[in-house]
Image (cartoon, rainbow, N blue to C red):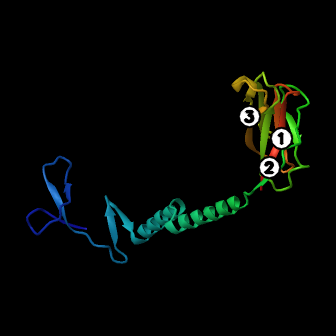
Amino acid sequence: MRVATPGITALSQLTIDADLDMAGTYQVKDLAAPADGEALRKGNKDIANAEVADAAAIAVAKLEDTVCTKALADSKIATHKADASAHHSKLAFVPLDPDQAHANPNDASWEDWDLSGEVPEGALYVLIYMINGSTTTVRNGGVRENGSAFDNYNPVPSWGVIVGTSTEWGVSCIVPCDANRIVETKASSKTELKFNCGGYFI
């Protein structure tokens, strides 16, 4: 590195305070890469070419470890799109005749419901109807994935309470089923609230 005082030749815009008191400054005139065997200077110590190369290699390695290239990002996006398309292409709904009413063995407790007699292997979700057989009283019911801790337990209206007619009323929901096609059900009244399977997604 060669430095010169102002006014000798055309100088760059970079100024360096000579003694940190702002009394005088030097301006960089020229900066060239050192030839083999020569060195840059940092204070009173030499920075050899090999050390510069080593530092550059470390910086490049760090960047390669932390930077996701566009090509890599595009590849990952394409993979996820393919996985999503493959998954959703499997989801076809198969309806069932919901004439097999299931009753919980106990009131107000979560119970396993084995649907393997109606739903085949490979099913991912089931459509469940909760039917309130009472024409005068609102009952609570719920369906959830087997093993879940979610207390999905809500009122199932009575049609008679809503419009004053003697007709059964219910609600429907879609829940995941496990590999054994088991879901969990809960009913405030095991005699009046029934469950039917209206189909499955596979």
Count of marks overlaid on the render? 3
Cα–Cα gap, marks 2 and 1: 9 Å
Label 1 SS: strand
Mark seen at residue 150: 3
Rendered image: mark on residue 199: 2
CA distance separating discs 1 and 3: 21 Å
Quarter of the image where the N terminus is located: bottom left
Which residue is depicted at the point 14% across and 66% down? 11
Q: Nearer the viewer, residue 60 or 156?
A: 156
Q: CA distance from mark 3 to mark 2?
A: 23 Å
Between disc 1 and disc 3, whose residue precedes?
A: 3
Q: Give amino acid for label 2.
A: Gly
Side of 94 where 39 appears, left or right: left
Q: Residue at x 87, y 49 (%)?
A: 180
Residue at image position (84%, 44%) is 98
- Three-letter amino acid code at the position of disc 1: Asn
**Drawn side of residue 50 relative to residue 78, left or right:** left
Give the residue at mark 1: 196
Disc 3 vs disc 2: Cβ atoms closer than 8 Å?
no
Amino acid of disc 3: Phe
Asked which quadrant contains residue 46, the reply is bottom left
Nearer the observer: mark 1 or 3; the answer is 1
